[in-house]
Image (tube, helix red, strand yellow):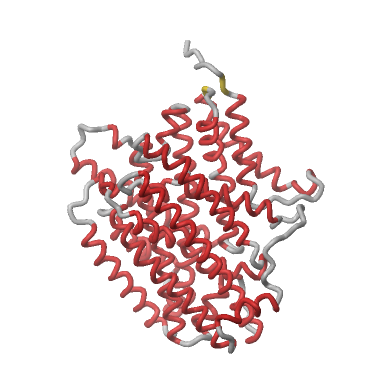
Amino acid sequence: MTPILILGIFLVYTLVLFIITYFTSRKATSHSFFLGNKVSPWFVVAYGMIGASLSGVTFMSVPGWVKDTQFSYMVVVFGYLFGYFVIALVLLPLYYKLRLTSIYSYLEQRLGFWSYKTGAGFFILSRTVGASLRMFLVINVLQVFVFDSWHVPFWVNVMIFITLIILYTLKGGIRTIIWTDTLQTTFMLLAVILSIIYISRELGKPFSELLPLVKEKGLFKMFFTDWHHERFFLKQFFSGMFITITMTGLDQEMMQKNLSCKNIKEAQKNMFTFSGILIFVNFLFLLLGAILMIYAQKMNITVSTTDALFPTIALNYLGPVAGIVFLIGLISAAFPSADGALTSLTTSFSIDFMGLDKKPGISEKIRTRMRYIVHISIAIIFFVCILIFRKVNNNAVIDNLFTIAGYTYGPLLGMFTFGLFTKRIAFDRATPFIGVLSPVLCYFLSRYSVELFNGYKFGFELLLLNGFLTFVSLWAFSSKKPVSKE
């Protein structure tokens, strides 16, 4: 495929997004930006959340990941399902009952001012790093297959992408994203299904024979039973469960979409529907990864990283139609992770640190101007982070993403668990120190786990350890009665 064709596809797709933006952002206010005026249809939210949850990381990293982990990721996905049930039955009722715009304001009501700021701060850190990593993956593909041939610097590519995200999210916010995510989910799922069909034809196998072929090639292993192994199935399952609880249930971006539904019943229907579909979709991604591996072996294709497997085959070996399908799917996976992150971070900073919801005397014009400044400032931070990832990234992005989540979402897990399941009064001023100390301790335990724990290697369950250390520390610095301020 020529760079001009690839760029043309990107521009046409972006134009469609701006058309949707035009219709959804008219007469937008701060309330519609943050919560979509609470009129979002639950089935639209559920469908769109598939694209937002998967993102460009799943689209490229999960297929390439099969080489190293086979189908063990499905155990993590089964854990996701139980995590979504916890969100629907425990967290969503709490958020709706308290009528929250930012979910971290719960921490202020339950634990105190400093706990609230700590929780919001960890979300901003987590989502900024995670979203930047997701965007880097997609932008890097455009750089390799388009901009490098034109000798355009990487930073220019990044600036173009982020500018487009700013322009179509700046006004409409969550109300726009609910509908653009629906379009993007559709194209992403079509891209996966059509890619499987194209590769199966190249292999000379009908769809019904793909799974037996994967088993025959020894790529279908799902359960690792050695408890020392970082992919041990119980660790995978519980890690998946708590990754979902933290990265969805304690994440402003994902919950902001749920809170835009009319009521709790519709939000729960959204969550149950979305979680069931997600299992099937993730299985398709793993199946795609397995047959990509088989095709690569057949054609003697080598790639520098596992993340490069899918784009290399789609753009260089399967013909122009398959390449177009891949590009549309990749772009469709990229935008939801970027636009949702930018909107949720704007919401969190505006509500949690600037207190825009607690300043009724401010006019809508001033409120909007302040929100615009926050929006653009966060986009600039994205720009810097992506340039940093360009210098340091060498592993599968999804592996990096979950590793980072273990450190940054762990304190959130510990704080919310303490607030929900105990009645003790936390020593609020100690929470920021606990929030920093727990991840640091986790890092050293993970680094020296083989020596300390008889060969045991930490995987994604590092998130659980981090949450546990935060919880125990909060308990240690708490009392049954309020601490006297005298």
- Is 449 situated above or below 468? below
Give left or right: position of 201 versus 363. right
Of 342 and 318, which appears nearest the observer? 318
Q: Residue at x 40, y 35 (%)?
A: 105
Q: Outermost residue, top direction?
A: 486
Does any portion of residue 383 appear in the rendered image? yes
Q: Residue at x 42, y 42 (%)?
A: 92
Give left or right: position of 389 versus 40. right
Give left or right: position of 470 versus 455. left
Q: Which quadrant of the figure has residue 108? A: top left
Residue 343 at x, y percent in the picture:
35, 51
Q: Residue at x 37, y 57 (%)?
A: 339
How many numbered discs, if any?
0
Of 431 and 481, which appears nearest the observer? 481
- Is 36 situated above or below 286? above
Does any portion of residue 344 appear in the rendered image? no
Q: Quadrant of the N terminus?
A: bottom left
